[in-house]
Image (cartoon, helix red, strand yellow):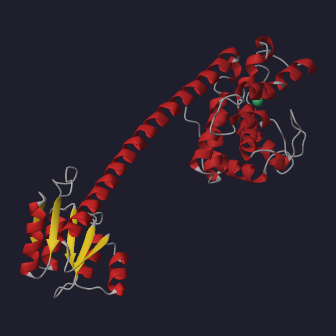
Amino acid sequence: MIDNTITNKAKILVVDDTPASLKLLTDILKGEGYEVRSAISGELALNAATSNPPDLILLDIRMPEMDGFEVCRRLKSTAETMDVPVIFVTAATETDEKVRGFELGAVDYVTKPYQRDELLSRVHAHLELHQLRHHLAEVVDERTAQLKESEKKLKNNLLDSVALLAAVVEMRDPYTAGHQRRVAEIAVAIGNALQLPETQVEGLRLAGLIHDVGKIRVPAEILSKPGLLSEIEFKIIKEHAQNGFDLLKTFDYPWPIAQIVLQHHERLDGSGYPQALKGDQMLLEAKIIAVADVLEAMMSHRPYRASLGIDAALKEIEVGKGRLYAPDVVDVCVKLFREQGFSFSS
Ligand SMILES: [Fe+2]
């Protein structure tokens, strides 16, 4: 006697064109507590299976009109029935036929005349396997949903912390309030125009939002000084790139945010700071933020001067194209402002 505790409520569809065979199979399975439906042709079998998918199908191969292979092929190409395990029951002992059946997606064969216990063992084993697979798929779905939820929470936390960092810097430096947000907006528009992957653009946005976070270590008097800076003051301001990197390097962001922040004042020809990197040593994101930063700074009012205007700002990056700023970045940026009417969100 087979232990049917796991599978005894299972629904089985039995398909055979010979009434006697159909009855025999049905009786054996019903005797084991299975819920059995029977179909005397391929066509009827397909109707029964799609309208109320069973947990397993026992399928005769040699039938008139539509043979078992065709029934199996159709079952496997129909959404409702493609996962239902099919066991062929046939007089055929030819290897070719068996191979063909497996290729069509059958899970097993029972050869007539079959032994009752062997038949039941196979049925039971495949039902159990099917249920385990089904259960596994449910567990995977559940875990995936949980992971997505916690990923969303983590991302929100990350965005909150970035927004907080940005707000803290701008609180101490009211003249550049909004600068980081606008740089982030330009950088994102450039990233999208360059058709960078969505996740890379997301990193670009976050890096833009906190690229001047290192200014937190610059004395407020220097940041808000109305007038030109002395050499020493300028030197202190320049330290913000390295300071930003030092602050961010321990955070485990999924993007190289700290490196981008470190490099945002580097220039292609090595004239930038703090490492005097050359073009190919710079991250693409840093090249993008460098352009967005210069452009936004020139467009905005400063304590010591009025806005220089968008035309002068675009001219500056065009003049520096290839020498200071990455040519492709400059090209899409100029296009954004001159042809595509880029504007800030507020
Ligand atoms: Fe900066």
Residue 125 sits in which quadrant?
Answer: bottom left
| Front one among 165 and 307 | 165
**In the image, 215: left or right of 71?**
right
Give the tally of numbered discs.
Answer: 0
Quarter of the rendered image showing ligand 1: top right
Provide residue 238's location: percent of width, then percent of height.
84, 26
Q: Residue at x 79, y 29 (%)?
A: 241
Provide residue 314's location: percent of width, then percent of height.
75, 43
Residue 77 visible at all: no
**In the image, 55: left or right of 254?**
left
Q: Is residue 188 above or below residue 219?
A: below
Residue 247 sits in which quadrant?
Answer: top right
Q: Residue at x 12, y 82 (%)?
A: 17
Quarter of the picture containing the C terminus is: top right
Quarter of the picture containing the N terminus is: bottom left
Residue 217 visible at all: yes
| Front one among 82 and 308 | 82
Q: Residue at x 64, y 24 (%)?
A: 166
**In the image, 143: left or right of 276?**
left
Provide residue 45's location: percent of width, then percent of height.
15, 73
Question: Can you name the residue that lies furthest to the top here?
Answer: 221
Question: Can you name the residue that lies furthest to the right here?
Answer: 231
Question: Can you name the residue that lies furthest to the front here?
Answer: 1
Residue 301 sits in which quadrant?
Answer: top right
Provide residue 168's location: percent of width, then percent of height.
64, 18
Q: Residue at x 29, y 66 (%)?
A: 82
Q: Is residue 121 above or below residue 185?
A: below
